[in-house]
Amino acid sequence: MQFVVLAAGRGRRLSPLTDVVPKPMLPVGSKPLLGHVADAAVEAGATELLFVVPSDDDTARSHFGARHRGVPIEYVVQSEANGTAGAVACAAEHLEGPFVVLNGDNLYDAEALAEVVDRAPAIGVHAVSDPREYGVVSRDGDTVTGLVEKPAYPPTNLANVGAYALPYLEPSAFEVATSDRGEREFTDVVGNVVEEYDVTPVEFDRWIDVGRPWELLRANELEIQSATRSIEGAVHDDAHLRGAVVVEDGAKVRERTTIEGPALVRSGATVGPGAYVRGTTYVGENVTVGHGVEVKNSVLMADTSVGHLSYVGDSVLGQNVNLGAGTTTANLRHDERPVELTVQGERTSTGRRKFGTVVGHGAKTGIDTSILPGVTLSTGATTFPGETVEKDR
């Protein structure tokens, strides 16, 4: 079956991390987010992958090439950012029969996805505590009765996971009206299918919508926690690695360094001497974690450097970040309420008691900078030596 994977979104809620890296190509463990989606599709029986990509970015094509795990890939360009229905419509001329649509920024359970395919026409659903943030599916037994986008008063707690197995649709089926958000919503297309066919809801036990920075952190936590210990890089005899630690070929762990897994140290990275890495931490390609640095439960993207005697906790650092010596990211409010982060101009609860900072690509901090919980440093932002950063920069 053909799988259409929507990978053209701008990822504004993940800004500044998506200023340089397209959202589907953000790292989740040892591969980009889109790689996990493609894996799930292949394991669910995909015979062809149709990646819908933006016209101004070739990152996915450069990374994946013509095939993924033996399955051919067709790249479909969405030249106009006019919504998810517009994205699928771009792929319509390539569709030959029943097909599957997946969001390119979600983590899917491959077994549940295979069930969606087997029970087509079907929609994947997942029970959530606050369905107002998602598309919400109503059901009557084994039949979907409705689909509504981000309702103020949700009829159920079943979030639409963005996994659809649908019958062949004529190109005219994608010509739905523009929503209040100024986009053509694919959920409106699916709603029309629900009216014509008996569509089955399939429950996903494991699903993450990676739309905001703390969800990227959560996705990495789940992925790295599932890894098996593997040491292929150079580890000094005086370093201590405990638990499920992965050190890739080409990585280096220097003397007097302690890494408490689960943790992933990617190729080209150097950790130490005398560093302490714990929690569930992603140390990206060519990252430097310097002398006396502590990193806890964080994501450090490629080519970033954390200067000596710094602390990074529950944070997400973009590419080419340089934290000056003694930089500290605070990650806990004194009132113990969940940390808030600015998302598209609004302070939003992360739902996490501990969360540090989000640092955009190329940002630099002066020595002895202190950053309060929930602060975002934009792409290219800088701080002064000894500064305490209380608000987004």
Image: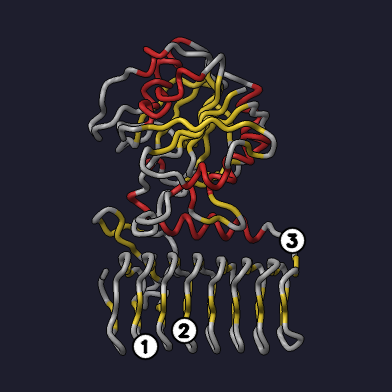
Indicate whether 158 appears above or below 357. above
The answer to which image quadrant residue 190 occupies is: top left
Q: CA distance from mark 2 to mark 3?
A: 29 Å
Q: Name the mark nearer the viewer: 2 or 3.
A: 2
Q: Secondary structure at mark 2?
A: loop
The local crowd at label 2, few if under 14, some if 14 to 19, many if 20 or more residues have their Cα within 10 Å, is many
Residue at image mark 3: 228
The crowding category of the residue bearing disc 1, from other C-alpha atoms within 10 Å (few below 14, some 14 to 19, many at least 20), is many
- Residue 350 percent location from the top left of the image: 39, 59
Looking at the picture, tell me which residue is in the foreground, 55 or 85: 55
Which residue occupies 67% across, 70% down? 250
The residue indicated by pointer 1 is: 367
Upstream in sequence: badge 2 or badge 3: 3
Quadrant showing the N terminus: top right
- Kindly check if marks 1 and 3 are in contact, taking CB atoms under 8 A apart as contact: no
Amino acid type, residue under disc 2 in the picture: Gly
Front-most of 33 and 242? Answer: 33
Q: Position of residue 364 (x, y in %)?
A: 35, 76
* Mark 2 and mark 1 residues within 8 Å of each other at the beta carbon: yes
Question: Disc 3 marks which amino acid?
Answer: Thr
Callout 3: SS: loop
Which residue is denoted by mark 2 in the rendering? 307
Q: Position of residue 106 (x, y in %)?
A: 51, 43
